Amino acid sequence: MIDFADVAMRLFENMYYLVSVILFVIGFHTMLTHSNLIKKVIGMNIMDTAIFLFFVSTGYVQGGVAPIIEPGVEQAYINPLPTALILTGIVVAVSVTAFALSLVVKIYEHYGTLDAEEIMRIRSTES
Amino acid sequence: MTFINVIHAHSTVLLIVSFLLFSFLMPILERWKNSWCATMAVAAHVLAFVFIGNLSWRVFTEGTIHYELGGWSPPWGIEFVVDYLALFMLITISTVSFLILIFGTVDLTHELKPKVLGLYYTLYLLLVGAMMGLAVTNDFFNMFVFMEIAAISACGIISVKSDRECVEASFKYLMLSAVGTGCVLLSVALLYMIGGHLNFAFAAAAIQDVAHIYPNNILVALALFSVGFIVKAALFPLHVWLPDAPSSAPSPSSAILSGLVIKIYTVVYLKLLYKVFPIELFDLLPVFDMILILSALSIFFGSIFAIVQEDIKRMLAFSSIAQIGYVFLGIGLANSTGLTGGLLHIFNHAMMKSMLFLSAGAIIYCTGIRKIDDLKGIGLKMPVVMGAFTIGAMAMVGIPTTNGFISKLYLALGTLDANKHFYLAIILISSFLNCLYYFPIVINAFFGESEEEDGEEEIQVKKLPLRMSVPLIILGAGCMIFGIFPKYILVIIERAVEMIL
Amino acid sequence: MGETTTSFLPVFVTLFPMLMTLAIYYVQKESAKLRNKLSVITSIITFIAVAAMYPQIIRGDILVFELFEIIPEMGFVGTFRVDILSFCLALISSFVWMLATIYSIDYMSHEHAQNRYYPTLIFTLGACLGIFVAGDFFTLFIFFELMSVISYVLVVHEETEEALKAGYKYIIMTIIGGLALLLGVINTFELAGTVSLEHTGMITTASGLAFATFIAYIIGFGMKAGMFPLHVWLPDAHPVAPAPASALLSGIMLKTGAYGLFRVFFNVFNVEFLQETNWIFVVTVLAVITILLGSAVAITQYDLKRRLAYSSIGQMGYVLLGMSLFTEAAILGAIFHIFSHAFMKGCLFICAGAIIVKTGKRDVRELGGIGIKMPVTMIAFTTASLAMIGIPPLNGFLSKWNLALGALDGGAPFYVVVLLISSLMNGLYYLPIIINAFFGEEVLHQEIKADDVPFKMLLSIVVLAVCCLIFGVSPINLPFDLSRMATDLLIGGGI
């Protein structure tokens, strides 16, 4: 017999991971199943955010504070490295998004639609 | 003599920094002296040759180079490692991209608007720099950053033509590569969770210690890495972006994408498999068998799809999917002969495929023909181009005295060493399939009846500029030379394999 | 047993034509005449170089040379090695090649794309000799592939739709054969650890892989030798090529397959093993089918060159049958038939070329009365045809006699019956041509002067016909002596 309370408790304790996995799946699903190009880009962003959340939470220590070390004060600090890395990751994600959106603009100019299936139909009828 | 000392001490990082520096100079140059861009891009490559020469001399005399960025020793600092594997990739990348660039300096003026020409070189140098970074990096996060740089700049050089096929292909590539890098970053996070290190060597040691406590973490990380790199390296069934991307892009972009970009991800994957993940893990999860199955599918279906293509560049792109399967086959065999074959095929295929794409580009440049059926009788009008194409085709099929034969031979012996005869059959069948789609082109080009369309339009052929024919001749000669004397490249590869296993 | 001597000659005969190809290619821009002369000189020098090995070979020496190392640590090195069997094949090849080149000069003078023809012809000579002088299976495979792929250019020379179709069939089958051969070589290396021809009986334990190797070799070499059921490319490819090229394709290049099979049976495996496991029976059965099928289908063909091509299939069956019986006389017959068939079929094809050039007729029914118009050509044709049928004292008789003796020695008189039936069928398709040519009603209304075939063509035709005649039962019979020595070598296991 599985102790549901225990499972729920453990899930609650690892809430960040749980949430980031859910977000990841939502993003991934949006990206692959929606035919609207903008929605694909949004899905990509949700997915990236999920990964960032996951990465940052690996460095989190329960009850820790920002690692600004004052002499003489004993305190639990969170690991600053993931946070620093994710800063870079966010910059990368922003630039990828910008690039993707610029491509979407170009596609719209060429086809007059943002629907991937519509674009496919246009291409197949023309060629 | 301090200058030489600086080069000697820092050539690892200078190699990458010089590419980045030159690429950022390009937009400025473009406004100031537009005609200098191409020369400067070539200069960056020449400079890179100096650094790589220095590196290879040091690797051969002193052994593996560990370079600590900014003097911070790992695990705190970022570390670059130049071993034989990295050196092999550096040499491959620099040589092939140099030749593609020389070709591109003429071809691009024809294919692109003059406005974006300077920016193209920016992206090109960024891409080459990022690939070199991937070859030497020894750090997870650096790897991620270089992957993103490579992905964005690769998308850039596809979409630079800004007609609709290019933009669409570029978007497709960007989305899939975002999935790929996302998976990779997630698995980096999973490994960081349990290991607490980002440096490959330290992470490997830490993971080894805790592997029995958190096997699931490592397995999920391995799965995500595999998915990420398979998307990036365009292995079947995640190859969908590749045929669109190179077939619509300018020829130099297609050449570098098919010839080099997909290879560098295989090498990084190889590095991760052997350097980071503990060996016991592979008993738990038959990852090598999975790679073998995927590579066999890739080899088979890549060739099958290539047969039915009408557009010459699209056909070449599908053929790349089959050929990347060979490289993965070498990795999956996991014995020294097979791995040698796989790595050798990276080098050989980089030469063959870039040569084929460049000759396709030259055909398009001179005649404007893209359809395979229209190429009848072109061989006598463009002997250099079709000669190079013929050599490339023969290398693809694996006719002896071309380099493709040597790598196939190694792979075939590797399958026997690993006692997996089925894959030997796959190699032989795919050689035959290659022949089915390459030889008709060559035959048509040289022996097609040209009297059929007497009154109709004769194919107009422009003269091929010297800067386009020389890279083709060099690559063609290279294919033959490394087919007869493969030992010159095997020197590096064998040491690399020895080090990996 | 002679000793092993290092000699540069084997390398020379291979690489010299290949290098001269470049020279010929560049010379042709200057003058066509110089190109033709250079081609002939190259083929003559090559023949002399091959013949120069004779004194050492006849002593029983083995000439070796190590040229370059491809992948040294894996045993894949470019070694060259000439023993008496290699020498036999190299000698006959370079001889017929020389005559074919001389013949080409007049024959090709009105053809298109000669600039492509001559370099290809000479390069193929180098590659073909390379097969015979190679010292290991790996080198052999390289030259085999080179020859097969390059000779594609000869096959499609006419560039008609028919030729292109036949050429496509040829190249596809060649690639399949090449891959099968590669499989065989790789398997041999895996099982035996070596592919050098110095060893005999490299594989002597029966296993699935060993059988796969055997089959792979049979497919690879059998494809080239026109063995049933892998012969399908041959009747299409040989007739469409220009006459001298078809003479070489049928007369010489088919023999590379036979040579390869000799090496497989005696070097990779050995006689005892193949007989013990009964694998050789596969070859015997296929050889019998090849003989009967080739001869039977030839009767139904009315295109002259196509009939000759089918006849080639039948004749290669003799060679395969002889080598698969493993008795001394049979092997002697097989090797001698390689010589005989090269002379006979070379002669027949270039005669056919001369006839087609002069009359423009390819159909055998339309060749009535041609014997009177072209007496020399037709007499040569007759000689070679009679040799094909096996009329004594021509050379075809001698090889068939030995094959029959070998079959009886092996206690298998059935094969003698096969030989007789096929000889009968040979008669059925060769004799009508001859009878029609000399005694038939003249259907040709075209005016041709008596034998105005150019001298150089006539020379080659006559030389080959004379070879058919004198290498029959004459007392001085160099090919027969060489074949006997080669047989001793093979049977003695002293390779």
Image (cartoon, rainbow, N blue to C red):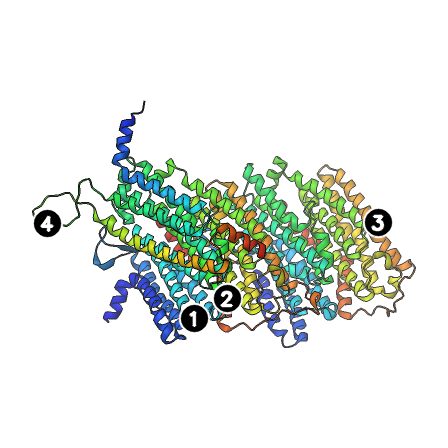
Q: Chain of mark 3?
A: C
**Residue marked by disc 2:** B472
Residue type of the residue flagged with mark 1:
Lys
Q: Residue tagged by mark 4? A: A70
Element at label 1: helix
Q: State how far apart marks 4 and 3 are (Cα).
A: 111 Å
- Mark 2, mark 1: which one is toward the viewer? 1
Q: Which residue is mark 3?
A: C428
- Could you tell me residue A119's position as x and y percent? 51, 53
- At label 3, the amino acid type is Leu
Taking B451 as reference, is B289 above or below it? above
B366 or B379: which is nearer to us? Answer: B366
Name which residue type carries label 4: Glu
**Residues at marks 4 and 2 on the same chain:** no
- At mark 2, the secondary structure is helix
| Cβ atoms at labels 1 and 3 below 8 Å apart | no
Mark 2 nearby-residue class (10 Å; few <14, some 14–19, many ≥20): many
Q: Chain of mark 2?
A: B
Q: Name the subunit of mark 4.
A: A
B285 or B340, which lies in front? Answer: B285
